[in-house]
């Protein structure tokens, strides 16, 4: 029973990640912020053979994917991807940027050092994927997989070095020094993005399921991936959104409805959107906060507050972009309806503040009307 987990959750400290001991694709994993949220989970199957794990959840941490090959002594890191969505979104659903766009040299160096030590300790000969998280300049190790990951093709294509070929040559007896990838003295090297910036974006099929809430979480929901390349992060992210069917607007009205913990973060996003010529609409709580910060915006009613409400404006296509962040395991039903309507009308939307920040940079690039094709080097 979920109430049996409460003492353990208190011991770990909210928010917590509740998950079965053996899962695939994040199935059955939940981020829980408080005791009522835990109670709302209902019965959770568990046994001595398959226990339920309660982990501390690193809220507002950034996640990283590192793909590498090791020959038993030397390590070649194809690249490090930084997830654009904060930790808590499944890695297969999160947009990710290569090279990392918001990280310190110290954290990047620490990841490389840990990767080398882990590869040697685990006696890896071939491919390896590591997932890290960083918060407040503290690095955390999430998991190590001595195998290829879904990001290997992405890293290979954008870095110009085929990691699969590297691994096969290692198995055939040719170490990384002989392959010309690693210096015999340093024993470690890392690839670079040949096009400047590359963004991997998840592709979803929410538009085929009208009653599905598109809010993202620990359980993987994407059905494909796309890529955007550019000389700047904004260019790469803009192209990744176009290729994934979430084309961002360059003018119009932006609807904003975020939970309380996201309001200060979203404030800078709204200010930038106003500078770029957008008008702002918001629900009462968000609008009051923005007004207190000196930003005037149109107030729109939620679904249960009568008509006209936000869904009416969405249906009439008076909204160009939606920024809506849910709170906790179960968002309010009105927020569910907002996101579902946005999806059905094919209006671009973000459900995390980090994606909203990235969207602003992309919109700045798109407003210049200078979209160019970038050539792949391999």
Image (cartoon, grey):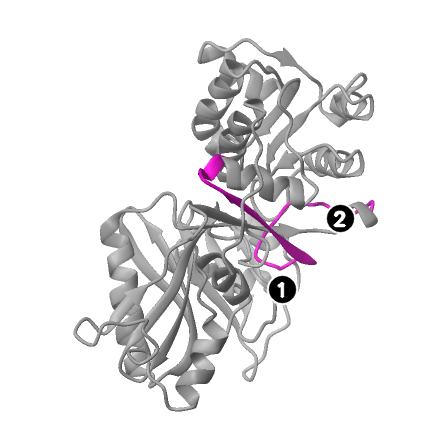
- List the residue tagged with mark 2: 206
Q: Residue furthest bottom?
A: 173
Where residue 152 appears, as percent x and y from the top left, is 51, 67
Q: Are marks 1 and 2 in contact (CB under 8 Å)?
A: no
Left or right relative to 205: residue 374: left
Q: Residue at x 57, y 21 (%)?
A: 285
Q: Residue at x 61, y 49 (%)?
A: 216
Mark 1 and mark 2: span between their CA atoms?
19 Å
Instruction: Specify the segment rendered in magenta.
Output: 209-234
> Can the viewer see residue 17?
yes
Between 41 and 253, the one lying in front of the other is 253
Q: Residue furthest left?
A: 185
Between 96 and 298, the one lying in front of the other is 96
Q: Is 221 contained in the magenta span?
A: yes
Left or right relative to 230: residue 279: right
Between 42 and 118, the one lying in front of the other is 118
Badge 2: residue crowd in 10 Å (few <14, some 14–19, many ≥20)? some
Q: Which callout, 1 or 2, points to the residue nearer the camera? A: 2
Between 315 and 240, the one lying in front of the other is 240
Of helix, strand and loop, which one carries label 2? Answer: helix
Q: Residue at x 66, y 64 (%)?
A: 43
Where residue 51 appears, as percent x and y from the top left, is 54, 76
- List the residue tagged with mark 1: 28
Q: Is 138 contained in the magenta span?
A: no
Which secondary structure class fits the magenta region best? Answer: loop
Where residue 139 appears, as percent x and y from the top left, is 30, 57
Where is 205 relative to 367, above or below?
below
């Amino acid at each position: 029973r979920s109430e049996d987990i409460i003492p353990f959750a208190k011991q770990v400290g909210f928010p917590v990640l509740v998950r079965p001991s053996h899962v695939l694709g994040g199935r059955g994993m939940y981020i829980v912020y408080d005791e009522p949220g835990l109670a709302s989970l209902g019965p959770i199957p568990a046994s001595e053979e398959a226990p339920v794990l309660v982990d501390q959840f690193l809220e507002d941490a950034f996640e990283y994917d590192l793909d590498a090959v090791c020959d038993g002594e030397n390590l070649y890191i194809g690249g490090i991807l930084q997830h654009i969505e904060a930790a808590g979104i499944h890695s297969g659903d999160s947009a990710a940027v290569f090279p990392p766009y918001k990280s310190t040299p110290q954290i990047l160096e620490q990841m490389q050092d840990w990767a080398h030590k882990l590869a040697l300790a685990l006696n890896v000969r071939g491919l390896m994927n590591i997932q890290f998280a960083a918060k407040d300049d503290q690095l955390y190790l999430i998991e190590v997989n001595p195998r290829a990951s879904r990001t290997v093709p992405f890293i290979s294509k954008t870095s110009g070095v085929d990691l699969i070929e590297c691994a096969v040559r290692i198995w055939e007896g040719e170490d990384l020094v002989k392959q010309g990838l690693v210096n015999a003295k340093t024993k470690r090297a890392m690839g670079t993005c040949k096009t400047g910036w590359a963004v991997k974006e998840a592709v979803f099929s929410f538009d085929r399921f009208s009653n599905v809430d598109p809010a993202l979480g620990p359980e993987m929901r994407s059905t494909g991936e796309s890529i955007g390349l550019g000389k700047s992060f904004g260019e790469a992210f803009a192209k990744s959104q176009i290729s994934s069917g979430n084309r961002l607007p360059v003018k119009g009205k932006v609807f904003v409805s975020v939970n309380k913990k996201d309001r200060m973060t979203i404030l800078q996003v709204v200010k930038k959107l106003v500078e770029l010529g957008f008008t702002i609409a918001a629900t009462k709580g968000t609008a009051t906060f923005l007004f207190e910060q000196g930003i005037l915006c149109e107030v729109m009613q939620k679904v249960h507050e009568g008509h006209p409400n936000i869904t009416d404006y969405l249906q009439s296509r008076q909204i160009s972009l939606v920024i809506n962040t849910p709170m906790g395991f179960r968002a309010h039903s009105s927020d569910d309806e907002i996101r579902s309507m946005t999806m059905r009308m094919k209006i671009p939307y973000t459900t995390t503040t980090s994606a909203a920040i990235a969207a602003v940079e992309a919109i700045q690039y798109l407003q210049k009307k200078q979209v160019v094709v970038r050539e792949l080097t391999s």
